């Protein structure tokens, strides 16, 4: 899962953002993380997070670097497993990093017990094939949508409470195909290694198997 690495740097500390600039960067990040293609692509997201991190530099000169390989490792694995480039998967990882720092604005903050229930039940619930409509019916509207808003398009739904110490739980979807809405591929929650914190639906497993055969 995403982590924020702390390093000490000797360079002169940059000028802090004004309140208006801070709000502007937050606005831009929260728009870009939901729809990267309309806001400069994925490459724009770490730049915006870095600007926020620079602004939050601690008095001892230590600042937080928001980018690391954990996020990219997960995206690479999903790109290997599934036939479509999962840009929204990477965006959701940046969203999870922002949530930890209080920078992700939630469209809906789950009550703590509702989020706990989701985290505890979703992996088993997803052992049956599901669609986006099923997820929203079961768990309600998401806290954030990463990717195309069209209910038939590939995307990631994120669910989080107001407590930023609780992880962003995510549902990854592929295109709807012959289903009524986007088809659930996988559910993920927590800060453990990718292989221990994600569960694939039967449909997601089948896609991954097909992809693996193509690479042989």
Image (spheres, grey):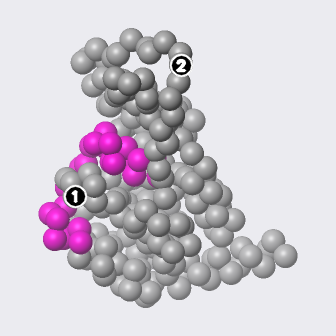
As helix, strand or loop, the secondary structure at mark 1 comes to loop
Q: Is residue 177 left or right of residue 105?
A: right
Name the residue that disc number 1 marks: 161
Q: Indicate the quadrant where residue 165 lies.
A: bottom left
Q: Indicate the quadrant where residue 108 lies.
A: bottom left
Q: Earlier in the sequence, mark 1 or mark 2?
A: 2
Tell me which residue sits at (43%, 88%) in the image. 128
In the orientation shown, which residue stands out farthest toward the front? 60
**Residue bounds of the magenta highlight:** 93-116
Tell me which residue sits at (28%, 42%) in the image. 102
User: What number is the disc on residue 10?
Assistant: 2
Reply above or below: 70 against 13: below
As helix, strand or loop, the secondary structure at mark 2 comes to loop
As for residue 215 lying within the magenta part, the answer is no
Reply above or below: 31 against 115: above
Q: State the separation of the CA atoms marked 1 and 2.
A: 37 Å
């Amino acid at each position: 899962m995403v982590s924020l690495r702390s390093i000490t740097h000797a360079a002169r500390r940059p000028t802090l953002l004004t309140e208006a600039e801070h709000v502007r960067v937050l606005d831009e990040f929260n728009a870009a993380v939901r729809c990267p293609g309309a806001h400069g692509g994925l490459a724009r997201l770490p730049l915006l997070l870095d600007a926020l991190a620079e602004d939050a530099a601690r008095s001892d000169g230590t600042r937080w670097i928001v980018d690391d390989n954990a996020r990219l490792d997960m995206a690479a694995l999903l790109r290997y497993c599934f036939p479509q480039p999962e840009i929204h998967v990477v965006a959701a990882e940046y969203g999870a990093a922002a949530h930890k720092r209080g920078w992700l604005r939630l469209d809906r903050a789950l009550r703590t017990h509702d989020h706990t229930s989701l985290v505890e039940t979703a992996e088993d619930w997803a052992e049956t094939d599901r669609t986006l409509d099923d997820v929203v019916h079961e768990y309600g509207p998401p806290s954030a949508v990463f990717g195309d808003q069209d209910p038939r398009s590939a995307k990631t739904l994120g669910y989080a409470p107001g407590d930023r110490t609780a992880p962003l739980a995510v549902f990854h979807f592929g295109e709807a195909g012959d289903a009524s809405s986007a088809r659930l591929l996988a559910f993920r929650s927590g800060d453990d290694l990718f292989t221990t914190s994600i569960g694939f639906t039967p449909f997601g497993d089948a896609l991954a198997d097909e992809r693996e055969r193509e690479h042989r």
